[in-house]
Amino acid sequence: MGALNQYITKFLLGNFILSICIFCFEYLINKSFMILYSSFLPIYLFILLIFNSYLIYWFIINFKYLNLPYALNIFRNVKQLEGNEKKFQSSHDIFRKIKYSKNGFSLFYKNWVSISIDDYNKKKKEVLQYLNFDGEIDIKPHGRKGVELVFFNLPELIEVSVFEYEEGYINYGQGINGRFMLPISKQCHTVCVGESGSGKSNFMHHILQSILKNKNKIEKLEMIDLKGTELFRYKDLNYVNFIDNVESVKTTLLNLKNVMDARFKKMKENNSQLYDGKFYFVFIDEIGTIGTFPNKKIKDEIFSLMIELFQKGRAAKILFFIFAQKIDSVNIPSGVLANIPTRILMKTDSDFNINNSIGTKESLEKITLKDPDSFPKGRAILKDGYSSEKVLLQIPYIKFIDN
């Protein structure tokens, strides 16, 4: 009944305003308000018919959206003082409009008192069930007292094109608004976690394609692949150093520390906060292989170097991209993980992975209602270390033609 009452109010108000406009128009034409006795009556009735037909049509196709706040009991309490008595009234949110997009649609609601974003976040499942929408929902404020409910679906398979990579940016995948790219100048150390078959290796190649698009900004690409299969294809590039054994990892990190120290020396001489030269990018595929290496002395030295490089390396334009199936203390020491601000979660059934990448269950449900263990291949949640923004992404599929 709430939605119907809201509609009747608009219906009567709309007819009243339209009638006033027509009577004023009649007066301008005939200098009289006697529209019922003039030749203008058929036109008046025709306009009312068209207008009311549109209102009825609008009500029918939008009824479920009009009724949503009433059906789900979304309202604000309004305290009114009448004499010495306190009375409470409820002010339901009002449907304003629907806007269609390429991936879905948006619903806009407003309340003359205020809008509670938390109420909509808590009722995400009920909203999707009520509208019978099989997809994702994003809740965000709109204006001072409004809210936008964004309903969308991400495709499960995207074939990437070379035109999707741009100089100066790293393309992370497709989000709610299309390609999600971040400036290369605002990159942070990154860890990507996901179980075998989640699309982690494909994501690594996708990020590499973006970086290779910016080869004029690269001084060196260190590729540590202890399985020796995923990154081997890049070894012949003149700015790539390929490493496939743990002993060489230590040597590489020692060299990077020397590079970092030399860059900091130049930065002090120039009184600058950020090195103005080219980047060193370091990719480590399956870092857990280092964590399970039997020689404890070498393993501890490697992780000790990592901690120092992660703490200070970004200012010297030395950035790490790490890929792992698990980010527990066995695979990545807490001292290393604590210095990796950007985190990417792919398909996993590990609560430890979820908590150490995205956060609590409540944080996860603000991004997606799907459990990470049911993610399709290539689905990911990105927590950007620079802005703290969290976004749901689908990673494009990289198809290589091997000789």
Image (cartoon, rainbow, N blue to C red):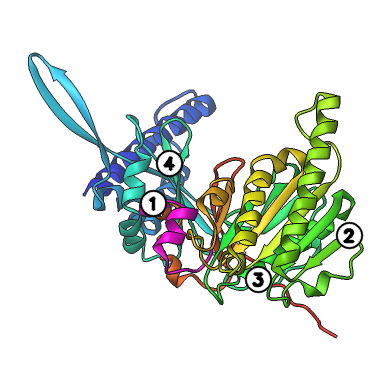
The residue that disc 3 covers is: 201
The residue to which callout 1 is attached is 360
Q: Amino acid at mark 3?
A: Ser
- The reply to whether dot 2 and dot 1 touch (C-beta < 8 Å) is no
Q: Nearer the viewer, mark 4 or mark 1?
A: 1
Q: CA distance from mark 2 to mark 1?
A: 40 Å
Secondary structure of the residue carrying tag 3 is helix
Q: Is residue 57 magenta?
A: no
- Asked where in the image residue 204 lies, by quadrant, the reply is bottom right
Mark 2 closeness class: few <14, some 14–19, many ≥20 residues within 10 Å: some
Q: Which residues are magenta?
A: 345-363
N-terminal-most mark, 3 or 1: 3
Q: Is residue 85 above or below residue 280?
A: above
| The magenta stretch spans residue 361 | yes
Q: Amino acid at mark 4?
A: Val
Secondary element under disc 1, as helix, strand or loop, is: loop
Of all residues, the one furthest to the right in this rendering is: 238
Amino acid bearing label 2: Tyr
Category of crowding for the residue at label 4, using alpha-carbon neighbours closer than 10 angstroms: few (below 14), some (14–19), many (at least 20) = many
**Residue 9, x across and y down, in percent:** 29, 39
The residue wearing badge 2 is 239
